[in-house]
Image (tube, rainbow, N blue to C red):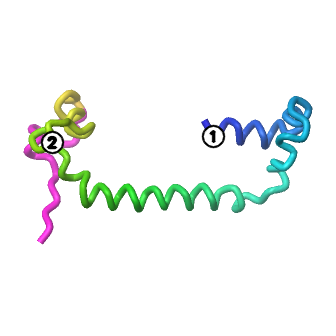
Amino acid sequence: FPPLPLWTLRWHAEDVDRAWPGVFSAYRLHEVGWLEVVTPACTAYFIWWFAFTGWMLVHGRHQHKDTTGLDTVYHFTMRSNKVLANLLGLRDLKDAPKVSYI
């Protein structure tokens, strides 16, 4: 869990230095600005998001139990969770939104 070690290094730096002298001394997060912490995390997330969205548009949308023999989390959830399916207005998976490209 990366947030927990980061939180520990930020708020308990002295305790960490006492426990492991010299190992984490470069991690002085109280001297780092907010943007210096958030920018790398957001950059990594958006790189992943663009790659994942590209994969979903090119390959992932074709994954279905009828075509690959494997089920997707979306279709399994819609079949097994009738309350959620009704909330989304799906009476049958055939009613599920489909994207058509011209």
Query: Quick one: 60 or 95, which is closer to the camera?
Result: 60
Please name the residue that numbered disc 1 is placed on: 2
Q: Are marks 1 and 2 in contact (CB under 8 Å)?
A: no
Q: Position of residue 73 (x, y in %)?
A: 27, 37
Task: Tell me what residue is drawn at x 9 percent, y 40 percent.
Answer: 66
Residue drawn at point x = 14 percent, y = 37 percent: 69
92 drawn magenta: yes
Q: Residue furthest bottom?
A: 102
Q: Secondary structure at mark 2?
A: helix
Which residue is labeled 2 in the image? Answer: 68
Indicate the secondary structure of the residue bearing disc 1: loop
Identify the residue shown where x is 38% and y is 55%.
52
Query: How far separated are the C-alphas under marks 1 and 2?
Result: 35 Å
Which sits in the foreground, 60 or 42? Answer: 60
Q: Is residue 16 magenta?
A: no
**Whole-percent x and y of residue 4?**
67, 36
Residue found at x 65% / y 57%: 38
Report whether 97 appears left or right of 18.
left
Q: Position of residue 55 (x, y in %)?
A: 32, 57
For residue 49, above or below residue 25: below
Q: Amino acid at mark 2?
A: Thr
Q: Earlier along the polypeptide chain: callout 1 or callout 2?
A: 1
Q: Which class describes the residues within 10 Å of circle 2: few (<14), some (14-19), or many (20+)?
A: few
Q: Amino acid at mark 1?
A: Pro
Res 92 quadrant in image: top left
48 left or right of 3? left
Residue 23 left/right relative to 87: right
- State which region is magenta: 84-102
Going by the image, does 49 lie left or right of 42?
Answer: left
